[in-house]
Image: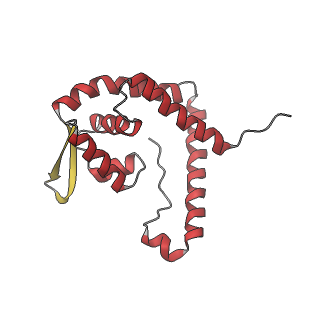
């Protein structure tokens, strides 16, 4: 008897495969997939704020901060106070980070192409729309389970998902 695959399982498998492929292509066992994508994001958007990094990578700000600190400690990123907003930090690559990113950005392009390259524009739009609906539905379920006071405290937002 054949069993229908659940969408959640397919999403988990897809995420795991992307992480495995990134690890294989990068070959540097000391660079996690999250660190890889963080370096790529900063390489593609020099001067990116920590807040924009968190929003763009769909992670909470403490996780983004820990990633940035780890990469700064490794000498790959530097952070400076944003002159326009002294509460904000802007991220940039160090010379070592820039050299590494020259190898990483093409890998990111290959991974993105493997994920989306076989899809027609219409199919890609449908997948993005469907995934956005799924995330919104899960956000709503989480808010419903927390109740109104806890959802406000954590800053739950109905529009977390944007196409990249």
Total count of labels? 0
Residue sitting at x 54%, y 36%: 16
- Horizontal side of 118 relative to 4 (left or right) equals left
> Residue drawn at (49%, 73%), measured in percent from left and top?
150
Q: Left or right: where does residue 88 sit relative to residue 67?
A: left
Residue nearest the observer in this picture, 23 or 60: 23
Picture coordinates of residue 101, whole percent (x, y): 28, 28
Find residue 146 and report its image quarter.
bottom right
Is the residue 150 above or below the residue 141 in the image? below
Tell me which residue sits at (34%, 32%) in the image. Answer: 30
Q: Position of residue 14 (x, y in %)?
A: 57, 35
**Residue 73 pos. (x, y %):** 21, 42
- Residue occupying the far front of the picture: 29
- Most extreme residue toward the left is 83
Residue 1 at x, y = what percent?
A: 86, 34
Viewer-closest of 134 and 93: 93
Residue pushed farthest right? Answer: 1
Q: Nearer the viewer, residue 149 or 159?
A: 149
Image quarter of the C terminus = top left
Q: Quadrant of residue 144?
A: bottom right
Residue 46 is at least partly visible in this image: yes
42 above or below 161?
A: above
Q: How is the image coloured?
A: secondary structure
The quarter of the picture where residue 32 lies is top left
Can residue 126 be seen here?
no
């Amino acid at each position: 008897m054949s069993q229908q695959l659940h969408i959640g399982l397919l999403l988990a498998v897809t995420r795991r495969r992307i992480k495995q492929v990134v690890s294989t292509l990068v070959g540097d066992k000391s660079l996690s997939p999250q660190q890889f994508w963080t370096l790529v994001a900063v390489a593609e958007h020099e001067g990116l704020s920590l807040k924009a990094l968190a929003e763009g990578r769909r992670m909470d700000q403490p996780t983004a901060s820990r990633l940035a600190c780890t990469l700064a400690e490794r000498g790959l990123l530097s952070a400076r106070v944003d002159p326009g907003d002294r509460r904000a930090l802007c991220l940039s690559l160090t010379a070592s980070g820039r050299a590494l990113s020259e190898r990483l950005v093409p890998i990111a392009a290959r991974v993105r192409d493997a994920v989306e390259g076989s899809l027609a524009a219409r199919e890609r739009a449908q997948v993005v729309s469907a995934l956005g609906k799924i995330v919104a539905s899960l956000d709503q379920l989480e808010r419903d389970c927390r109740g109104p006071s806890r959802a406000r405290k954590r800053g739950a937002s109905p529009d977390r998902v944007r196409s990249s």
